Image (cartoon, rainbow, N blue to C red):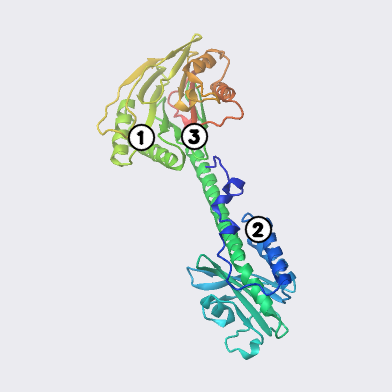
Amino acid sequence: MRHPSQTVDDPTKRELFGPLGDADPLPPSLLASTNEQAKTLALLQEISRDFSPLISHTVLLRTIAERVKRLVNYDVFNVMIWNEDSQLLQSIFALRYEESIPARVTLHLHEGLTGSAAAQRATLRVNDVLTDPRYIRTETGIDARSELVVPLIRQDRLIGVIDLESTAPHAFTDAHERMLSTLSPFLAVALENSRLYEEAHESQRRLQNDLDTAREIQMQLLPTGAREIPGLDLAAAYTPARDLGGDFYDFLPYGEGKLAMALGDVSGKGTAAALYGALAIGMLREHVVTHNCPPEEMLATLNDRLQGGRLDARFIAMLFAVYDAPTRKLTIANAGCPYPLLLRNGQVSELHLEGVPLGLFRGTLYDQQAFDLLHGDVVVFASDGIVESDNAQGEDFGSDRLAQVLASTTPHDSAQSITQRILAATDAHSGPAWAPHDDRTLLVLRVTEEPTADYSRLPIIY
């Protein structure tokens, strides 16, 4: 999922957070003096210019504290946020004599001077806290004598409060109260934007971690290869277009000297497609444990089980094949995948097999065909993401180019090298600046000579 994607750090995402111009209207009280007005407007200009949602709470609040300090001489600066779920004011930042201190205070509405100001949504200035019965002493490390609490309101919602304390009585004036009341709507917007950004950033981080883990699990579901199959060189390649892909493949022991192979392509992309593919793999492996049935029967069984799940608008194109090493016979059934390709003596041909994708119609029957392979033959199963790999001009890679790449291989090329050649050719066709739009999956079989074949040994899937 990233598509990859713009993160919340991208400037184009800033419109998700309200601009400072969204602050509530200024209070109707007029500023008392030209000097006071000039200082307040200067600070407002700094806020509008410099404050961004794309900075952390700590940086934002320290910046606010430093700038408010120019207007108001305080000893403790404390910011509390209103938590709607817990119905508590929670301290998130505290500064004492320009040094950060632990923010551990929580208060109910109407509790203490801070809770009273928040509940009343009105600025509260107390010249001597020792004479006010509402005062609650907190662990700030100072003996407070005066306090100024300014609620932060945005669109009639309580965002939090700014709480200033001083060791001197009568430390805060009418001018301080007016200036902070004027600033509070803008500070509320800046604080709310920062909170929303941090929540979005944290959600994105968790989502990306989940996707990374899911992709690792998905790759673990897919085997790397299979050995101990006399006379068969086998390779697979899988390149998802996103963090999670909807393609899958599997290798399955299918009796003495036999190996089953599956390649599937789930409709759609992303997480839902990946989960649907994992479901299909689980069904396939479960069925194989008890019944090594012919390919046509396997597809019919999977179709009915998937269709019974009633997952609307989801289906799977799938090839299922069984290779019999003693006879070099490959039996294939197809449920809507591109035709397999056969390379023999330098010539490429399609193995024409058709069928309805899985999960669409209950009771669908499938056909199968058996092909006698020869030493040196190469068979390629490819998902449609290979032939439909396009470029910036909208031109698909196409089946003809795939056939040309396959025809250009030599008898000395391994199955693994052939898969890499095909992927490299699709990459070159798309170009480095063009991201693939679909998953690309390949299974390549090359028939080799096996002079001392032991067909009693089971294929080892790894």
The percent position of residue 117, horizontal first and vertical second, equals 56, 78
- Residue mark closest to the camera, 1 vs 2: 2
Left or right: residue 398 compared with residue 9: left
Q: Decide which of tag 1 and tag 2 comes sooner along the chain.
A: 2
The percent position of residue 298, horizontal first and vertical second, equals 32, 30
Distance from disc 3 to disc 1, alpha carbons, whole Å, reads 23 Å
Q: From the viewer's perspective, is residue 319 above or below residue 276?
A: above
Q: Which residue is more in the foreground, 284 or 138?
A: 138
**Do we see residue 450 in this rendering?**
no
- Residue behind mark 1: 315
Distance from disc 1 to disc 2, alpha carbons, whole Å, reads 52 Å
Q: Decide which of tag 2 and tag 3 comes sooner along the chain.
A: 2
- Which residue is located at x 61 percent, y 64 percent? 186
Question: Dot 2: within a 10 Å radius of its alpha carbon, few (fewer than 14), some, or many (20 or more) residues?
Answer: some
Residue 48 disc label: 2
Q: Decide which of tag 3 and tag 1 comes sooner along the chain.
A: 3
When asked about the image quadrant of residue 316, the answer is top left
Residue 223 disc label: 3
Q: From the viewer's perspective, is residue 208 above or below residue 260?
A: below
Q: Which residue is more in the foreground, 21 or 305?
A: 21
Indicate the amino acid at tag 3: Pro
Distance from disc 2 to disc 3, alpha carbons, whole Å, reads 56 Å
- Residue mark closest to the camera, 3 vs 1: 1
Indicate the amino acid at tag 1: Phe
Left or right: residue 188 compared with residue 270: right
Indicate the amino acid at tag 2: Ser
Residue 394 disc label: none
Q: Which residue is more in the foreground, 129 or 346?
A: 129
Q: Secondary structure at mark 3?
A: loop
